[in-house]
């Protein structure tokens, strides 16, 4: 997060009632905003969160004002991997960091947002990154993707647990500047109703299509592209993320939605999860999650 080359502000895609910030059993460890008994810890600890994050980006790009802010202020073209890393660090801090670490991460995002404002070149409408409606849009794209992708990939959650996850996540948009009177979806039913309400405002502007192409084929260092399987691996993952979008979003991008497409996307997501689970934890767990586990274990 923070300013990146040529005077741009790097607008990270991940913006952001807790289950309790202390370890179970009365320990003194700081479990952060959510705590080890939360559904958030389960969902955000899934190996398919990268897949979910790419889906969230593709979905967010369909809001013209949100896309205008990214196109005009983000350094995703110049530094895509750095931006991805900073996004992962933010998500790790708010999900698993101490309360102080989470508060610092949120404060940094709010500082960046204050400088991100401009005009949509297509409609002439003014936008601001701290507009509550845009903050709500970004939040809903994220939680819909995180919850939806991890469940389709094989994470077993009851309907009540899925609703609990969304209720836990209501905390973040308010901390990022959404007024308390705004109704942040706290259940899967409310989240579906939100997307039904906002869909008339959405469309795939040229910048969104460009961003989608960039997400599918980001630049790689020469030696990585030639000597490793990174390119086909990333393309396969990004194509699965695109396939996991809701049918109406895929149609906005001009993609076909044949019969059986959703089933095929779910099968692909489960295959990714199966493969990623074979990797050692050090490759699939971020530093904030590892540190949180150590804090909780030490307090018991």
Image (cartoon, rainbow, N blue to C red):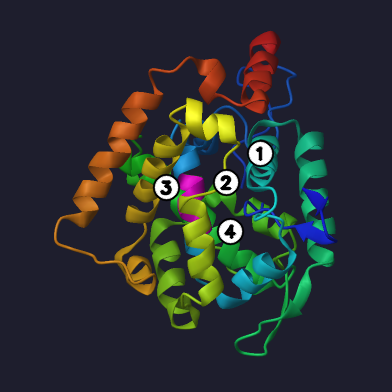
The answer for how far apart the CA atoms under marks 4 and 3 are is: 21 Å
SS class, disc 4: helix
- State which region is magenta: 52-57
- Give the percent coordinates (x, y) of residue 130: 75, 68
User: What residue does disc 3 label?
Assistant: 238
Asked if the residue at tag 3 contacts the one at tag 4, i.e. Cβ–Cβ closer than 8 Å, the answer is no
Q: Mark 1 or mark 4, which is nearer the start of the sequence?
A: 1
User: What residue does disc 2 label?
Assistant: 219
Asked if the residue at tag 1 contacts the one at tag 4, i.e. Cβ–Cβ closer than 8 Å, the answer is no
- Give the percent coordinates (x, y) of residue 251: 32, 71
Image quarter for residue 132?
A: bottom right
User: What residue does disc 1 label?
Assistant: 85
SS class, disc 2: loop
The answer for how far apart the CA atoms under marks 4 and 1 are is: 19 Å
**Which marked residue is nearer to the observer: mark 2 or mark 4?**
2
Q: Mark 1 or mark 3, which is nearer the start of the sequence?
A: 1
Residue 150 colored in magenta in the image: no
The answer for how far apart the CA atoms under marks 3 and 1 are is: 16 Å
């Amino acid at each position: 997060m923070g300013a990146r080359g040529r005077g741009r502000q790097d607008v990270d895609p991940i913006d952001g009632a807790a289950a309790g910030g202390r370890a179970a059993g009365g320990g003194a460890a700081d479990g952060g905003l959510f705590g080890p008994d939360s559904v958030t810890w389960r969902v955000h600890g899934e190996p398919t969160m990268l897949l979910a994050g790419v889906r969230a980006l593709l979905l967010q790009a369909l809001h013209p004002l949100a896309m205008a802010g990214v196109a005009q202020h983000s350094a995703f073209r110049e530094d895509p991997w750095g931006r991805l890393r900073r996004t992962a660090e933010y998500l790790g801090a708010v999900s698993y960091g101490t309360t102080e670490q989470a508060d610092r991460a949120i404060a940094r995002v709010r500082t960046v947002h204050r400088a991100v404002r401009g005009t949509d070149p297509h409609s002439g409408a003014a936008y601001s990154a701290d507009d509550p409606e845009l903050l709500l849009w970004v939040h809903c794209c994220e939680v819909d993707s995180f919850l939806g992708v991890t469940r389709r990939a094989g994470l077993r959650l009851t309907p009540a647990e899925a609703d609990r996850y969304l209720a836990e996540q209501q905390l973040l948009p308010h901390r990022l500047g959404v007024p308390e009177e705004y109704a942040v979806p706290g259940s899967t039913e409310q989240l579906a109703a939100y997307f039904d309400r906002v869909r008339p405002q959405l469309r795939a502007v040229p910048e969104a299509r460009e961003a989608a192409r960039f997400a599918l084929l980001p630049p790689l260092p020469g030696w990585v592209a030639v000597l490793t399987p990174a390119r086909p691996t990333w393309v396969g993952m990004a194509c699965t993320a695109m396939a996991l979008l809701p049918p109406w979003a895929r149609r906005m991008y001009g993609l076909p939605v044949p019969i059986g497409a959703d089933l095929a996307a779910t099968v692909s997501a489960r295959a990714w999860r199966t493969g990623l689970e074979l990797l050692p934890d050090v490759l699939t767990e971020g530093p904030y999650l590892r540190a949180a586990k150590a804090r909780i274990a030490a307090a018991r």
